[in-house]
Amino acid sequence: MYKSTVGTSLLVLMFSATGVWAGHTNEVLEAELDGREEVGSDPSQRLVGDPNGKGEAYVFGIDGDPTTLCYVLTVDKIDLVAVGAGMAAHIHEGARDTNGPVVAVLAGPEDGNAGDCLTEGEAGKFPAEETGIVQRILQNPASFYINVHNPRYPGGAIRGQLRNQIHDHDDDDVDTADGTPSVPGNLSAKVYSSTALELFWDVSTDDTVVVGYDVYRDGQFLSGARGNSFFEEGLMPGTTYVYSVVAIDNLANESAQSNTLSVMTRNQ
């Protein structure tokens, strides 16, 4: 899972600057951004974002101020340009695998990171000028996603759905969950060519948070995946591979292995 030291430092600075200390009551939202999460106009075309791009974002409110939303954002392995040259970031309303309208304008991470606080009524920050949009985002994170754009990928280079972090905001946080994630279901594949394919499976559930998946090929660990899909290239033409997937939660608990799936690449 991609983690950024810069992102963590920015988060600390943002909390300090806004007076949000340990014991605060606002939930911190997070999003893990990936180029493979981008959605194009053709739903069958999965690879529309930057295949190497990664990112991380945190979004949170301010105690006693229901109309202000703060965020920190870091990106990695995408083209960085000045904001005036096409670098941009937004919060959109929409479920995963759908596209939706911009509801909040974030600073473009032209140096690889960005952070700010936005207040309802502030010019140009909330395009729809909807009263209560900040609380709607904070209370319904799964209905919103962050998208980062650059000239190479004007429709979006990397994207990630918002979700709640699991902690109680106290100095003495204690994790008590001891469950394991549900088994990833309905493993399927789409073969793109003689050397490339993509796996898909249902999102696992857990009593904490499912943070990723381990993908196995022919019984051996192959790679980690953030979301419920995995793209692989460089395979051999006309060859059958056997895949399975394991879900992992934020306490490092692992699910049982999914069903196995045999997939044959195309012949040249």
Image: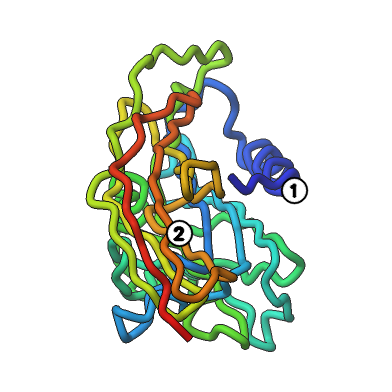
Q: What's the residue at 58%, 15% (across, down)?
A: 171
Q: Position of residue 187 (x, y in %)?
A: 29, 53
Give 254 or 79, whichever is nearer the viewer. Answer: 254
In what element is the residue under mark 1? Answer: helix
Q: Looking at numbered disc 2 in the image, what kind of residue is underneath it?
A: Phe
Q: Which mark is residue 151?
A: none
Residue 143 placement (x, y as % from top left)? 29, 56
Where residue 6 is drawn, which disc sits there? 1
First-in-chain label (2 vs 1): 1
Residue density around tag 1, few if under 14, some if 14–19, many if 20 or more, within 10 Å: some
Asked if residue 121 shows in the view, the reply is: no
**Occupied quadrant, residue 97:** bottom left
Residue 241, above or below 246? below
Q: Nearer the viewer, residue 109 or 239?
A: 239
Q: Element at badge 2?
A: strand
Colour scheme in use: rainbow
Kind of residue indicated by mark 1: Val
Q: Is residue 44 above or below residue 215?
A: below
User: Is the residue under label 1 in contact with that under label 2 (CB below 8 Å)?
Assistant: no
Question: Viewed as shown, does residue 189 lie left or right of 148?
Answer: left
Could you tell me which residue is drawn at 43 percent across and 58 percent down?
A: 241
**Which residue lies under the disc numbered 2?**
230
